[in-house]
Image (spheres, rainbow, N blue to C red):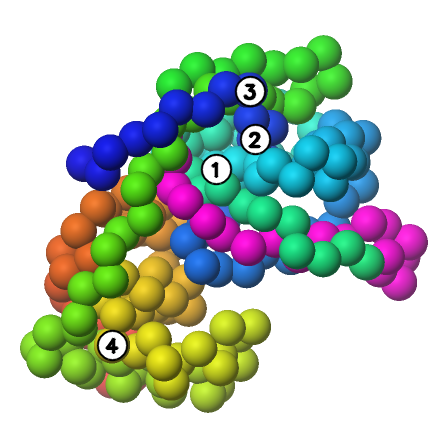
Amino acid sequence: MAATTPGQDYPLFPLSNVLFPGGQLQLRIFEPRYIDLVRECARTGRPFGVCMILDGHEAGQPAVPAAVGTLATITDFHTSEDGLLGIVAEGGLRFRVTRTRIRSDGQVRGDIATWRAEEITPLPPEFGLLATILERLVDQMQPPWRHDVITRSDDASWVGFRLSELLPLDPNECQHMLELDDPLERLAELRDILPRFQRP
């Protein structure tokens, strides 16, 4: 387990999907509790925590978040065509929630322990196919970080997180990939899953 650093009272944003370190998140904000969250983060410069929903929904009653999530730093704001606030956020360090509470407006807050970033690990030759598959997926899907493939396709951690993002995994599988703390183990599991997506 990576060493942790404690942090207190972070706003948490439960979502139906997983944000990985280095990934990009685009959200349309309409509920007052989340507008307050965005204002707070814009004012303080602090990130907010993104956790996959274990029980409940993104809107309405407070959802039950997974214990492991990813810090998200807002990088851009915009107003969408329907007049709603839109934000772009980038995934940073992973964390484990140590305690949660719910404000009167339904916003979930949490004390967290952040994990150290995974060290850059050269991609072993036996996982070279995964880097090739990632390049093909990037060509097809054109993710925001597509230009980084040239310089980062030899980083086992980066390749594993990006594949976890682009492959059609179910949310629980994505959460599992997020929680693994060995980049080579993550790649091995992704390699074992690949046959599911091959055309007959």
Residue appearing at x 24%, y 55% in the figure: 119
- Using the numbered discs, state the Cα–Cα distance from disc 1 to disc 2 in whole angstroms: 7 Å
* Res. 108 visible in picture: yes
Given residues 197 and 69, the one toward you in this image is 69
Q: Which mark is residue 9?
A: 3
Query: Which three-letter amino acid code belongs to the residue tagged 2?
Result: Leu
Magenta-drawn segment: 79-96
- Using the numbered discs, state the Cα–Cα distance from disc 4 to disc 3 in whole angstroms: 37 Å
- Using the numbered discs, state the Cα–Cα distance from disc 4 to disc 1 in whole angstroms: 28 Å
Q: Which mark is residue 12?
A: 2
Res. 11 image quadrant: top right
- Left or right: 122 with respect to 166? left
* Quadrant in which the C terminus is drawn: bottom left
Q: Name the residue under label 4.
A: 154
- Secondary element at image label 3: strand
Q: Name the residue under label 1.
A: 51
Nearer the observer: mark 2 or 3; the answer is 3
Q: Is residue 91 magenta?
A: yes
- Secondary element at image label 2: strand
Q: Where is residue 85 in the image (x, y as percent from the top left)?
A: 82, 49
Work out which residue is located at the far left of the displayed protein and give it: 126
